[in-house]
Image (cartoon, grey):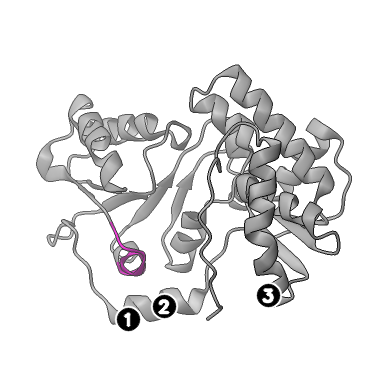
Amino acid sequence: GCEVEAVAVSGFFDMELTDGQSKTLASQLKPVVEKHGLQWLQAEAGYCARVALVVKRACPRLKVSFDCRGVLPEEAVMGGSSSARVAALERMEFQILHQSDFVIFVAHAMQAHYIAKYGLLKDAMIVPCCIRENSIRESIKCQEVKCGLPEDGRPVLGYLGSMAVWQCSEEMVALFGELHRRYPEIFFAVFTPKADQPKAKTLFETYGILSGSYTIAELACEQVPSVLTRLNAGMMLRLDSAVNRVASPTKFGEMIAAGVPVVATDCIGDYSSDVTK
């Protein structure tokens, strides 16, 4: 493994960094760069890249690679942020994209989004969120996880992820409800973080799905492969929005690697066109 330097910083998610905050960040992180003789900083997502560019200004020979994982302003809009915060995120995003030495996008659709929005013509590498197929297979062999799944042979339709609005959680459970009325033998499995489980339970109750026909649970990363093998199909629904059009959901790759058919909509990054093909 790599050596880790833990540095506590303040104002990480502030809309704007003041000159004082920037100077403090530079004074905290410049010694780490010099200690290890770093030539590149790999910055995952926007807020980390903003910090990396502050350090770059203090260390002019340092290069920054921006690993772009999502469209921050559009995510903020969907999350209900103020127009001031959205505007600040757009300024930050523009600065990061133009000042970074190298850019990594998770989808061709993401690159096209930034070309259209900012006229960004910089060379970039496309690296989808991915998994190691061998690790999935080995995990399946090593561990069996039940997590409330039925043992009576009923078909299981499953979902893994958060219940965020852009994940179409309500639309998904509404579909589950319609399927439940038509095919009561289907069992539904939602694996989501504990914080999202009350919302999931409320949705199942709202759409009239009986308690013996579903499970809601949280999974550790190492449990995912084993659970996937119990699914007859996985769900991945998305609305047509900028957030979804540029996405690269890791769960899609995990399901495919585990041999699980995926029921997918349009507007899921590059994956929807792959499904169509």
Above or below, 118 relative to 27: above
Which residue does the numbered mark 1 point to in the structure image? 141
Give left or right: position of 70 versus 6: right
Task: Tell me whether the residue at label 2 lies in contact with that at label 1, contact meaning CB atoms closer than 8 angstroms.
Answer: yes
Task: Assess disc 1: are there few (<14), some (14-19) or many (≥20) residues with their C-alpha within 10 Å of its C-alpha.
Answer: few
Residue at 67% in and 28% down: 88
Q: Is-magenta flag for residue 123?
A: no
What is the magenta range? 219-226
Q: Looking at the image, which is closer to me, 21 or 218? A: 21
Give left or right: position of 100 versus 216: right
The part of the image, by quadrant, that contains residue 63 is bottom right
**Callout 2: SS:** helix
Q: Which marked residue is nearer to the observer: mark 3 or mark 1?
A: 3
The part of the image, by quadrant, that contains residue 32 is bottom right
> Label for residue 137?
2
Above or below, 166 relative to 246: above
Which residue does the numbered mark 3 point to in the structure image? 35
